[in-house]
Image (tube, rainbow, N blue to C red):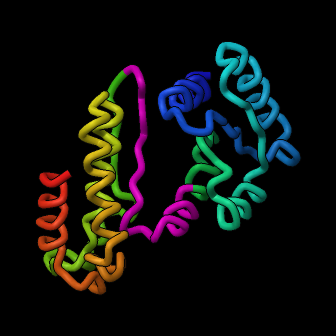
Amino acid sequence: ERCIRYAFQYAVKRNKKKTVTVVDKANVLTYSGDLWRRTAKEVSTEFPDIKLDFAFVDATCMWMVKNPEWFDVIVTNNMFGDIITDLAAMTQGGLGIAAGGNINPEGVSMFEPIHGSAPKYTGKNVICPLATISAGGMMLETLGEEEAAKTIEKAIIKATGEGYIKSLEAGKMGMSTGEVGDLLSKFVKEV
């Protein structure tokens, strides 16, 4: 219930499409799927301005590739969430830019780049730091520092959208990890 409630609260805060999509596999995992759906329906009555939608995980993955803009806030369990976040990482440019958060609205949260620690690249100065920087932006947003989070997001959009970074793949950025960090620092100051 807390997870679903937070999804609705987040949809209110985002001020975008105002849609919460519950992703499950209720046609196969009937008991757990039914629990998520019933809970979402109950919680949704407290948020009349938010549209509630339901989707199966396999269809969600297909539509995320074809029409990712259809989704606003997705709420699901950990197993399906792991699958969906990896797919979402690739649709936004790869693991080099994707960040994630384990958010506890009433306590400590944890934010991280989706790519993990990548130990084979340790000390080589070739990893794209944008996922880590994005995770910092997510943390700032969760802490209520929306303006700072937007500044980081704008800096990342500028760096990736205007050709400063050639690729998000390790060793193919056209600059080192440190140089990308310096570039983002410069853009944050300019925004």
Instruction: Relative to 111, say whether 64 is above or below.
Output: below
The residue lying at 66 percent from left, 27 percent from top is 50
Q: Is residue 77 visible?
A: no
- Residue 101, horizontal then vertical, whole percent: 41, 44
Q: Between residue 50 and residue 143, name the one nearer to us.
A: 50
Using the image as rendered, state which of residue 94 and residue 109 is in the foreground: 94
On screen, residue 62 versus residue 157, left or right, reads right
Give left or right: position of 60 versus 106.
Answer: right
Residue 66: x and y, percent? 70, 66
The spot of residue 149 in percent (x, y) is: 29, 42
For the point 78% across and 57% down, which residue is it? Answer: 59
Name the outermost residue toward the top: 46
Give the number of callouts.
0
At x 77%, y 30%, the residue is 37
Q: Residue at x 32, y 50 (%)?
A: 135
The quarter holding residue 46 reads: top right
Residue 144 at least partly seen: yes
x and y percentages locating residue 49 in the rendered image: 66, 22
Vertical side of 177 occupied by 113: above or below? above
In what quadrant of the picture does the N terminus appear? top right
Residue range of the region highlighted in magenta in the rendering: 85-106
Q: Quadrant of residue 52?
A: top right
Relative side of 188 to 140, left or right? left
Q: Quadrant of residue 8?
A: top right
Tell me if residue 84 is in the magenta stretch. no
